[in-house]
Image: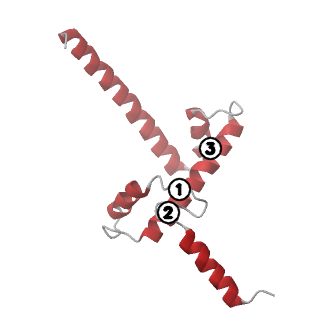
């Protein structure tokens, strides 16, 4: 029978095996810098605890993974398209509004870049 002390010691050993910048699964941290800035922007300390950032990143990765898997099942099987994401968030008014805002901004940026490139091309630069 395994005692509580043995379990705790095993947990401590596993915890020390995790390298900075990676997760228990060994995956590299992808969004730490951005999440730290977002956390600060939403009122956290300028240098939030690494554990807090790691937990938040795990939640973000889990959300992205779940949404991607669902999106792959909705539209054309095996492909994720913008319409699939819009379909999945359609009942959550906050997410739907944010997706629409981001898509609108993306279109405006594309138009602005195209106009800038046309002016640049017309000037002969």
Q: In the rendering, which numbered label is found on residue 56?
A: 2
Query: At 46% across and 69% down in the image, what residue appears?
Result: 52
- Image height check: is 12 above or below 92? below
Q: In the rendering, which numbered label is found on residue 28?
A: none
Query: At 59% across and 32% down in the image, what residue appears?
Result: 81
Mark 2 Cα shell of 10 Å, populated few (<14), some (14-19), many (≥20): some
Q: Quadrant of residue 79?
A: top right
Q: Quadrant of the C terminus?
A: top left
Q: Is residue 14 left or right of residue 99?
A: right
Q: Position of residue 25 (x, y in %)?
A: 61, 60
First in residue order: circle 3 vs circle 1 = 1
Q: Is residue 57 left or right of residue 34?
A: right
Q: Is residue 13 left or right of residue 38?
A: right
First in residue order: circle 2 vs circle 3 = 2
Q: Quadrant of the N terminus?
A: bottom right
Tell me the element at label 3.
helix
Mark 1 Cα shell of 10 Å, populated few (<14), some (14-19), many (≥20): some
Mark 2 and 1 residues: CB-CB less than 8 Å, in contact? yes
Q: In the rendering, which numbered label is found on residue 60?
A: 1
Residue under label 3: 68
Disc 2 versus disc 1: distance between alpha carbons? 6 Å
């Amino acid at each position: 029978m395994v005692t509580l002390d043995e379990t705790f010691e095993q947990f401590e050993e596993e915890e020390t095996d995790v390298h900075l910048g990676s997760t228990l699964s060994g995956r590299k941290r992808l969004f730490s810098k951005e999440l730290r800035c977002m956390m600060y922007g939403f009122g956290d300390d300028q240098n939030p605890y690494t554990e807090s950032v790691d937990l938040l990143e795990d939640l973000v990765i889990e959300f992205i993974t779940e949404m991607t898997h669902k999106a792959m099942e909705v539209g054309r099987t095996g492909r994720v398209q913008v319409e699939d994401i819009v379909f999945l968030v359609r009942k959550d008014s906050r997410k739907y509004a944010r997706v629409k805002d981001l898509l609108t901004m993306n279109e405006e940026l594309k138009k602005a870049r195209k106009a800038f490139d046309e002016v640049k091309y017309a000037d002969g630069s």
